Image: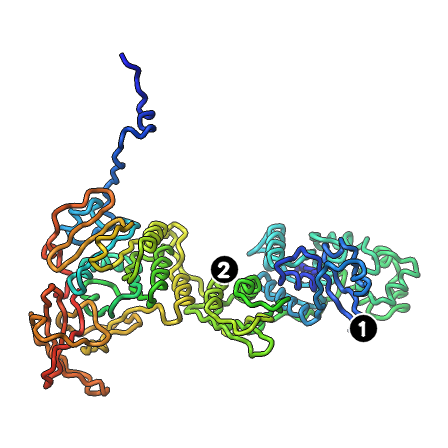
């Protein structure tokens, strides 16, 4: 009989590849859309991490994707910060979506200051979610946001154009949104579901 | 009543040293006329060089070249006394600067809050050390006794019954009598208080002025001492003169940290906060640059005040080297501590939202952080405000999530009208009259927008929002 090979020595020589430990699904941050929750490995947004929303254009439902989450957070008195939003949030629509505006703050900043402000908000740990619209965000800037979100245990959302999908990103979740469907490009803790989710399957954000 | 006397044996030196980042370097304080400069005080490092108080400056320079000099400034001593009184006001309602370089605190009534005395004393010492002042602390049943005990002791606390015992061995010249009386006692062979008390009282009254007996009675607590109590001023002002011309922000941070810490000390004593203060950077040939710091709520935490002022200071351009830094706070509203839940949901070292907001405002500008509020107005431009507001809204049709600040013309034929029109006609009373027909439109890419055309105008549709 051949000698018994110790398992840990085999592992130490890196000849055996080990899969990553499975992250137990914790639906602590449901998206509010049943179809999307079912597709995501954690049953919702990755907690304390950066999620990227790559939208093909403005006005195709990219806010409706987040409104249920923001409504849930503001209802439990968690602060939501919008850092440098591209347009003015129309209060009536946000109210109709259930967002409590008393817990919503808008930070006006441009360029690098906006990234700095988003990072400060994430790191502080006093916000429930931070939304930002970085204009020229390189890999390093996104990684900083990701680390800040981990430090502050805060949900971070970065809206970026769909062209960025070709570039790698340190975000824990990447969603590509266009007028018809939502595709999961990358999700930490599981394989990205190949099948896109039709926008029609997402619950309407309210108001219409 | 029990009185604590905190004596500052080298107040002038400490006051200068605490403004310098190199506190261990030899330093002497100079006084006297321009012709006869002499050393008023020296720090331990200068003493090690052989320098002594009372030497002339030329003699000192003959001994060593390697020491820094600063002016002995009686006005500065007065300022430090005021700061220390403001600090002491936090611990006792009865604070007096009756004796020079010395702080009298009534501590009996404060023991319930800060006591027992050993713990209270430890706290006083800890804070004074942090402020950078050397000190001696004694406690006695009356302020005069506490003061003379501080001449000979540090950390001594005596009660009513041990007062005589503690005072008896004190030498006569340390009891606060006039110089003539002290020397007269010395010539009589009276060396300490016990011997003095053994003398017949009527004989003393005959041979010495009345002040001697009254001082004796005050010491023993048989005669009250009228004290002027400290009342905190309504504004804070502090100034640090830099010992060289500073051109970089980095070198301003040390004095700035001292100033904000002093401000925080003062505010804690007064139980108030600060909402607005101005930092003046003084130049040689120009009026001082001002760095105003405004906060949304009253604050008084030293680290936070420093951080915010630093944020504002770093944006400031220095047109000329800075000679001195001055901090002036006039608006001192009462401080209301923030309510915190007992079981905070975020237990990690999270920064409160108020502090985060101030940090953002400090760097990005006063208007950088806004809320969002709805207004009961149908005109989209008037329907929002940057202040959070709680108003009842009239029912309205679907509204887009994004509102464009400026409406943009849409190319004819690039969009399909999905729904509409919805007439919005309002504002005739304030000059912002609008008459518009709003349509829900969709582009070929599937973007859904909100566009309008002014009634009676055949121009292109103007895009005003996105149903995002």
Question: Residue B29: x percent and y percent?
Answer: 73, 64
Q: Is residue A172 above or below residue B445?
A: above
Q: CA distance from mark 2 to mark 1?
A: 45 Å
Residue B52 visible (yes or no):
yes
Residue identified by numbered label 1:
B35
A195 to B286, vertically: above or below: above
The quarter of the picture where residue A23 lies is: top left
Q: Is residue B261 in view from this perspective?
A: no
Mark 1: few, some, or many residues within 10 Å (few <14, many ≥20)? few
| Relative image position of residue B401 (x, y in whole percent) | 19, 67
- The residue wearing badge 2 is B303
Q: Where is B380 relative to B257, above or below?
A: below
Asked which secondary structure carries label 2, the reply is helix
Q: Position of residue B335 (x, y in %)?
A: 47, 66
Identify the residue at horizontal 22%, vertical 60% (top origin): A161
Near-viewer residue (B258 or B217): B258
Mark 2 surroundings within 10 Å by alpha-carbon count, few (fewer than 14), some (14 through 19), many (20 or more): few
Front-lying residue, B350 or A122: A122
> Going by the image, does B85 lie left or right of B225?
left
């Amino acid at each position: 009989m051949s000698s018994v090979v110790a398992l840990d020595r085999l592992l130490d020589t890196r000849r055996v590849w080990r899969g990553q430990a499975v992250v137990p699904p914790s639906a602590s941050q449901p998206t509010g859309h049943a179809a999307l929750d079912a597709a995501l490995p954690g049953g919702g947004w990755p907690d304390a991490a950066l999620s990227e929303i790559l939208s093909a254009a403005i006005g195709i439902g990219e806010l409706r994707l987040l409104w249920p989450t923001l409504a849930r957070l503001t209802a439990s008195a968690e602060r939501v910060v919008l850092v440098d939003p591209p347009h003015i949030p129309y209060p009536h629509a946000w109210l109709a979506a259930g967002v409590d505006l008393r817990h919503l703050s808008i930070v006006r900043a441009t360029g690098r200051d906006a990234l700095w402000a988003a990072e400060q908000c994430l790191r502080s740990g006093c916000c429930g979610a931070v939304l930002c619209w970085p204009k020229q965000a390189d890999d390093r800037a996104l990684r900083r946001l990701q680390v800040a979100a981990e430090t502050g245990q805060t949900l971070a959302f970065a809206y970026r154009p769909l062209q960025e999908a070709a570039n790698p990103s340190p975000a824990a979740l990447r969603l590509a949104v266009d007028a018809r469907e939502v595709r999961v490009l990358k999700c930490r803790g599981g394989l990205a579901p190949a099948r896109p989710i039709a926008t029609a399957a997402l619950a309407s954000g309210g108001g219409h | 009543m029990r009185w604590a006397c905190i004596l500052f044996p080298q107040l002038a030196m400490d006051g200068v040293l605490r403004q310098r980042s190199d506190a261990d370097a030899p330093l002497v304080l100079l006084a006297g006329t321009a012709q006869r400069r002499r050393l008023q005080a020296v720090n331990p490092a200068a003493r090690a060089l052989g320098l002594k108080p009372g030497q002339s400056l030329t003699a000192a320079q003959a001994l060593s070249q390697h020491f820094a000099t600063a002016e002995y400034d009686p006005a500065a001593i007065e300022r430090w006394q005021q700061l220390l009184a403001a600090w002491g006001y936090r611990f006792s309602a009865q604070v007096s600067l009756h004796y020079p370089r010395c702080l009298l605190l009534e501590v009996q009534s404060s023991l319930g809050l800060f006591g027992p005395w050993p713990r209270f004393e430890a706290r006083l010492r800890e804070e004074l050390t942090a402020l950078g002042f050397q000190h001696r602390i004694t406690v006695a049943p009356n302020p005069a006794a506490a003061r003379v005990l501080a001449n000979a002791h540090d950390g001594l606390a005596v009660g009513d019954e041990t007062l005589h015992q503690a005072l008896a061995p004190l030498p006569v010249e340390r009891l606060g009598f006039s110089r003539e009386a002290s020397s007269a006692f010395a010539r009589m062979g009276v060396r300490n208080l016990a011997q003095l008390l053994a003398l017949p009282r009527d004989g003393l009254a005959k041979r010495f002025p009345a002040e001697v007996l009254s001082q004796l009675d005050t010491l023993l607590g048989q005669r009250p001492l009228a004290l002027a109590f400290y009342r905190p001023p309504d504004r804070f002002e502090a100034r640090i003169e830099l010992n060289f011309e500073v051109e970089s922000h980095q070198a301003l941070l040390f004095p700035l940290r001292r100033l904000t810490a002093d401000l925080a000390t003062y505010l804690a004593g007064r139980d108030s906060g600060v909402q607005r203060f101005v930092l003046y950077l003084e130049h040689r040939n120009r009026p001082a640059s001002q760095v105003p710091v405004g906060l949304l709520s009253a604050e008084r935490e030293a680290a936070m005040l420093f951080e915010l002022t630093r944020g504002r200071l770093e944006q400031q351009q220095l047109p000329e080297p800075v000679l001195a830094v001055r901090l002036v706070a006039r608006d001192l509203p009462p401080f209301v501590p923030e309510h915190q839940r007992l079981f905070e949901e975020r237990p990690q070292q999270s920064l409160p939202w108020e502090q985060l907001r101030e940090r953002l405002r400090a760097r990005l500008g006063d208007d950088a952080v806004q809320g969002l509020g709805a207004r009961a107005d149908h005109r989209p431009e008037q329907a929002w405000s940057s202040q959070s507001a709680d108003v009842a809204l009239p029912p309205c049709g679907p509204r887009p999530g994004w509102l464009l600040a400026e409406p943009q013309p849409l190319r004819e034929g690039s969009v399909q009208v999905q729904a509409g029109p919805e007439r919005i006609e309002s504002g005739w009373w304030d000059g912002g009259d609008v008459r518009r027909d709003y349509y829900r439109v969709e582009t070929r890419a599937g973007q859904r927008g909100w566009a309008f055309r002014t009634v009676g105008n055949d121009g292109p549709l103007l895009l005003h929002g996105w149903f995002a």
